[in-house]
Amino acid sequence: MAYPAAQLIAAYTAANVGVAPDASTTAILGSMATQTQAGQMADATALACVVNSADMTTTVANTADQFFTGLTTSQAGLAFLVNSGANATDLNDPYYAAFNIENRYMNFAANLGLLGAGAASFASTYGSMTFAAFVAALYETIIG
């Protein structure tokens, strides 16, 4: 099934919790749609590009929440963390614009693990460990 541009745009907007693509991204999605329809790009490749567009936002929020709270972020939580008029430092606001993906993860994780919903769990799990034991436990938890 070749994706039309409207479907790729809708998928992008959904993956990014209501943030529609800008003009440049819309043009890229349109080009990808043309390529899928011409058989020059696999549908799976186009969809992977759309899903990966959320790496700097939705993925940061979901991964950090999962690690620190053990929970999957709710739709309302994602809306607040990724695209919220009520949150001046959501992951699409200027505060995070200069951050690369690694710095977004570190900043977001530090806030969640030290000050947010994951603070108590993080402290009880890792608070009494030496630095070496802490790094080893994190490595095992994250990498396996």
Image: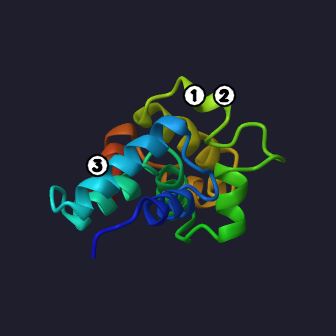
Residue type marked 2? Pro
Local secondary structure at mark 3 = helix
Which residue carries the number 1 mark?
97
Rendering coords of residue 96 (x, y %): 60, 31
Local secondary structure at mark 2 = helix
Which residue carries the number 3 mark?
136
Mark 2 packing: few (<14 Cα in 10 Å), some, or many (20+)? Answer: few
The residue positioned 62% from the left and 51% from the top of the image is 19
> Which of the pair 22/113 is nearer the observer?
22
The residue positioned 62% from the left and 49% from the top of the image is 112
Rendering coords of residue 84 (x, y %): 75, 50
Q: Is residue 29 left or right of residue 93?
A: left
> Which of the pair 78/69 is nearer the observer?
78
Instruction: Determine the residue located farthest toward the top in the rendered image.
Output: 98
Q: Mark 2 touching mark 1, by CB under 8 A? A: yes
The residue positioned 60% from the left and 67% from the top of the image is 73
Q: Earlier in the sequence, mark 3 or mark 2?
A: 2
Residue 137 is at least partly visible in this image: no
Instruction: Determine the residue located farthest toward the right in the rendered image.
Output: 86
Residue type marked 3? Ala
For the residues labelled 2 and 1, the Cα–Cα distance comes to 5 Å
In the image, which disc is placed on residue 94? 2
Residue 47 is at least partly visible in this image: yes
Quick one: quadrant of the C terminus?
bottom left
Of circles 1 and 3, which is in front? 1
Q: Mark 1 touching mark 3, by CB under 8 A? A: no
